[in-house]
């Protein structure tokens, strides 16, 4: 857990530089609520105060909080981040029996609850330190009336290789993910499967330059929370398959669902839904690919 928290720091640092001090407010709120919820749930389950107070030291609640804070738009109310952390720990983790017993990734449970409850708060992201908000690249691609990528050049939502406001943090999460791979903490087949399928579907949809094709593989990789999800969320060892073939299938399925929602869903991105659906299928994948 310490290594995972350390690996998140490059992306979170770039996130804070891009979006300003509100990121720290979200981080503080998520961490505080996750620890409080952890202790409260342990007490509710009959654990003594002394044991309950020592449990957050394992770092799992902190990692959950960091993932949530990295996913919620900084312009949103910190109360939303706090609610996400509360539901992540209470519903996503302890409702299933605590650490190691959860079927679904806790951070994605909490994030999805607030995403569907407060959709307007997730519609616009600040464009930078000036606090102005605007549509993301995925929104632009979905509602651009068929303009080509050449015509969209210079649009404030598009960056150098991916989405403005997202691509730099995504590079930070990629660096952190490679660190986790080097340390042997995560199954490499899952992030490779996710990124490979996203790239293949993007190439398949490519129409020579129309934005309706959803851009290039790099633009899909370096927008939204794809790098964060591929290396830090989908690789949660409790909620992904154990076997090699199962991990390939899990990664491919997550990537395919993400692209299906990005291409035709009502939400601009589908990462949380893809992860949760993949988690739900994991028991079957464990039986199918022992």
Image: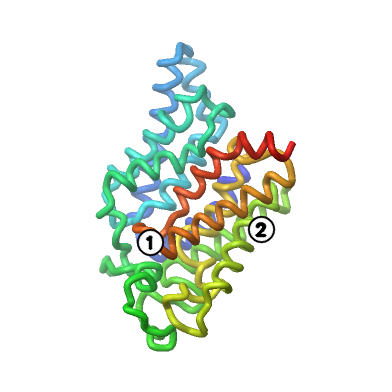
| Colour option used | rainbow
24 left or right of 248? Answer: left
Disc 2 to disc 1, C-alpha distance: 23 Å
64 or 252: nearer the eye?
252
Q: Quadrant of the C terminus?
A: top right
Question: Residue 1 falls in which quadrant of the image?
Answer: top right
Task: Residue at the far bottom: name it.
Answer: 150
Q: Residue at x 62, y 41 (%)?
A: 240
Which labelled disc corresponds to residue 91? none
**Element at label 1:** loop
The first of marks 2 and 1 along the sequence is 2
Residue 119: image x %, image y %?
28, 52
**Element at label 2:** helix
Q: Which residue is mark 2?
A: 192
Residue 150: image x %, image y %?
43, 88
277 left or right of 176? Answer: left
* Up/down of 162 relative to 169, above or below: below
Q: Which residue is mark 1?
A: 268
39 left or right of 240? Answer: left
Q: Residue at x 49, y 43 (%)?
A: 276
**Mark 1: few/some/many CA within 10 Å (<14, 14-19, 20+):** many
């Amino acid at each position: 857990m310490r290594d995972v928290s350390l690996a998140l720091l490059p992306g979170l640092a770039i996130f804070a530089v891009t979006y300003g001090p509100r990121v720290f407010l979200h981080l503080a709120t998520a961490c505080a609520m996750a620890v409080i919820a952890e202790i409260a749930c342990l007490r509710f389950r009959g654990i003594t105060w002394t044991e309950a107070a020592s449990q957050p030291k394992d770092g799992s609640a902190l990692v959950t909080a960091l993932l949530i804070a990295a996913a919620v738009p900084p312009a949103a109310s910190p109360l939303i981040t706090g609610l996400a952390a509360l539901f992540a720990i209470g519903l996503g983790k302890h409702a299933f029996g605590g650490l190691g017993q959860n079927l679904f990734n806790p951070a994605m449970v909490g994030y999805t609850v607030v995403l569907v409850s407060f959709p307007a708060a997730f519609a616009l992201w600040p464009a930078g330190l000036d606090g102005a908000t605007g549509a993301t690249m995925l929104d632009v691609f979905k509602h651009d009336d068929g303009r080509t990528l050449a015509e969209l050049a210079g649009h404030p939502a598009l960056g150098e290789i991916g989405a403005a406001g997202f691509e730099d943090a995504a590079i930070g999460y990629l660096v952190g993910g490679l660190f986790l791979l080097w340390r042997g903490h995560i199954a490499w087949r899952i992030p490779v499967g996710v990124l490979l399928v996203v790239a293949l579907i993007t190439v398949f949809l490519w129409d020579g330059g129309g934005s309706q094709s959803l851009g290039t593989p790099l633009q899909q990789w370096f927008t939204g929370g794809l790098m964060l999800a591929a290396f830090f969320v989908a690789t949660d060892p409790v909620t992904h398959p154990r076997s090699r073939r199962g991990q390939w299938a899990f990664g491919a399925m997550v990537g395919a669902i993400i692209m299906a929602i990005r291409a035709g869903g009502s939400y601009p991105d589908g990462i949380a839904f893809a992860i949760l659906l993949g988690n739900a299928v994991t028991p079957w994948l464990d039986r199918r690919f022992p």
